[in-house]
Every structure is written in structure tokens, then in C-alpha cells.
Amino acid sequence: MNNAFVRFIRPAALVLAAAALLALPVRTPAQGKKSASGEQFFIVASVDLQKSQLLLKYPTEVTLLARASDKTKFTDENGKPLKISDFRAGDTVWVLSENGSDGVTANSIRKGRMTVADLHRYYLDYAEIK
């Protein structure tokens, strides 16, 4: 091979390799963050009433399939009782769940919005600007 060609290719390959590493996706720590009460924030993607399951979506677009049991407590923002059939795609919810051998089971699902303070606390790395 031409010596000038080899001197050009090595640095170019290093630059391409570095660019490829920088393009790799970074897992956001927010997917695992929980509120002080242990709840996590989701957007309801879909509800399967026959299977008592909710497809929940983190704001990062990662999904989680959660099963509701007969012990799952459903409430609105004011603590009033709801049923699984009261939830629709697009609803925002706070979920307290546990992982079991048969998947994720929701212990409680509370309709509720995310405040700006919550957004900064759970999803943004910088302090809220006042």
C-alpha cells in the first residue's frame, strides 16, 4: 500500500470511530427515578380491559406493560376512586408497582399531571430557573 494512503486512513478511522461512539444512545436515569412515595410518572399508551393491563410509556418513549390486580387502587388527582375503565390513552398517571415473576403489577395508579417542579426533579439535570 501507498505510505501516504496509510498515514491518511489511520487518523480518519479514529475520527470515524470516535464519532460512532458519540452517536450511541445514552440511557436516561429518569426511567428509574421514583417520587418520595415510590411512584413513577407515565403516560397511558393503551388499556386492555379484558387482560386488566395498561401499556405505560415513560416520557422518554420507553414502554412498560403493567398488570392490574384486584388489589390495584385507582384514584384521580383528588384521591377519589376510579376503575381501570376510567383510564384512556394519553392520560398521565403516577404508578406504584412491583416486579414479580409474572411481570410488573401495579399496586396503585393515580391520575395526575406532572408539574414543572416534578419535571425538573425527575427528568432534567439542571436546577429549575425561577
Image: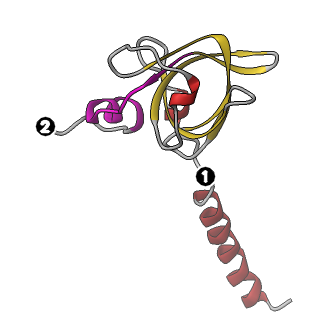
Q: Quadrant of the N terminus?
A: bottom right
Depth order, front residue of 47/85: 85
Residue 48 horizontal side relative to residue 120, left or right:
right
Taking the magenta stretch, the answer to whether it contains residue 122 is yes
Mark drawn on residue 25: 1
Q: Callout 2: 10 Å neighbours few (<14), some, many (20+)?
A: few
Say which of marks 2 and 1 sits in front: 2
- Who's the residue at 32% across and 17% down the image? 78
Residue 20 horizontal side relative to residue 92, left or right:
right
Q: Is residue 126 above or below residue 51?
A: below
Question: Going from the N terminus, do you reach mark 2 or mark 1 first?
Answer: 1
Q: Which residue is mark 2?
A: 130
Q: Is residue 24 above or below residue 37?
A: below
Q: Quadrant of the C terminus?
A: top left
Tags 2 and 1 in contact by the CB under 8 Å rule? no
- Who's the residue at 70% across and 73% down the image? 13
Residue 120: x and y in percent read 32, 35
**Which three-letter amino acid code belongs to the residue tagged 2?**
Lys
Depth order, front residue of 7/123: 123
Q: Callout 1: 10 Å neighbours few (<14), some, many (20+)?
A: few
Depth order, front residue of 93/35: 93
Task: Give the structural element (helix, strand or loop) at label 2.
Answer: loop
Residue 121: x and y in percent read 34, 29
Q: Which residues are magenta?
A: 108-123
Q: CA distance from mark 2 to mark 1?
A: 31 Å
Residue 113 horizontal side relative to residue 45, left or right:
left
Q: Quadrant of residue 15?
A: bottom right
